[in-house]
Amino acid sequence: MVNTDDARRPERETTRLTDGDRRAQLTDAAVDHVTAHGIADLSLRRLGDAIGVSHRMLIHYFGTKEQLLVEIVRTSERRQRELLSRLHAEPDLSPADAARRLWQQLTDPQLAGQELLFFELCGFALRGRPEGAPFLDGLVADWLEPLVAAEVAAGTDPVAARNRARLGLATVRGLLLDLLATGDRTGVDAAMEEFLRLYYGS
């Protein structure tokens, strides 16, 4: 027999979270689900069932499926920046090797759905579609800060560091789009190696 107090406890504990905490919790669960299962046939109802909440709860916190998708990609991007920061903090890892490790993570086949969603949202935003508009906020600036910091820490002039950071970001995104469009992992990896050779001189 189910103890009714135990059955209610998770709901009571959830109410102790702030709205921001609960939204972040749901976003993380959604990112994990999309990473594992992709975005094909994704609906708020199916996603809610998968992560243990009602689709009405997702509507309450995100408004629409499109707004939730924006949060999924933004959270995925944040996780990638955090990984990059951790890699740069490893004392025995060169900047080039840190970039290689990040590239391996970004091109993990499990993340292909998230990468596809990233470019789809970019297209929506650039065409003025409302579901994509919030996605442009921080699209470049959020990445420049950690990339510039890493360049400056390596002794690069701050102005040159910003230019190099922007070049690196654009190259990685361009090669990710290439990979999605062609599926040529060998060719794209070779192009990244050539870029790293030119970028870092090794």
Image (cartoon, rainbow, N blue to C red):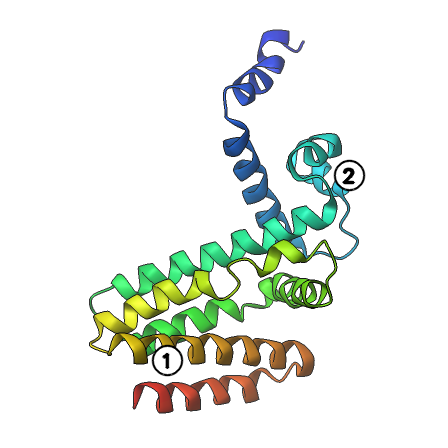
Observer-nearest residue: 158 or 33? 158
Disc 2 element: helix
What crowding class fits label 2: few (fewer than 14 Cα within 10 Å), some (14-19), or many (20 or more)? some
Residue 88, image x, y percentages? 29, 66
The part of the image, by quadrant, that contains residue 7 is: top right
Observer-nearest residue: 199 or 182? 199
Nearest to the eye among marks 2 and 1: give it: 1
Q: Looking at numbered disc 1 in the image, what kind of residue is underneath it?
A: Arg
Task: Please give left or right for residue 189 compared with residue 64 in the image.
Answer: left
Task: Please give left or right for residue 82 compared with residue 174 in the image.
Answer: left
Observer-nearest residue: 17 or 93? 17
Q: Quadrant of the N terminus?
A: top right
The answer to whether residue 15 is above or below residue 54 is above
Q: Quadrant of the C terminus?
A: bottom left
Point 31% across, 81% down: residue: 160
The part of the image, by quadrant, that contains residue 161 is: bottom left
Residue 162, image x, y percentages? 36, 74
For label 2, the residue is 45
The answer to whether residue 84 is above or below residue 190 is above
Point 58% across, 63% down: residue: 111
For label 1, the residue is 164
On the question of residue 93 being in view, the answer is no
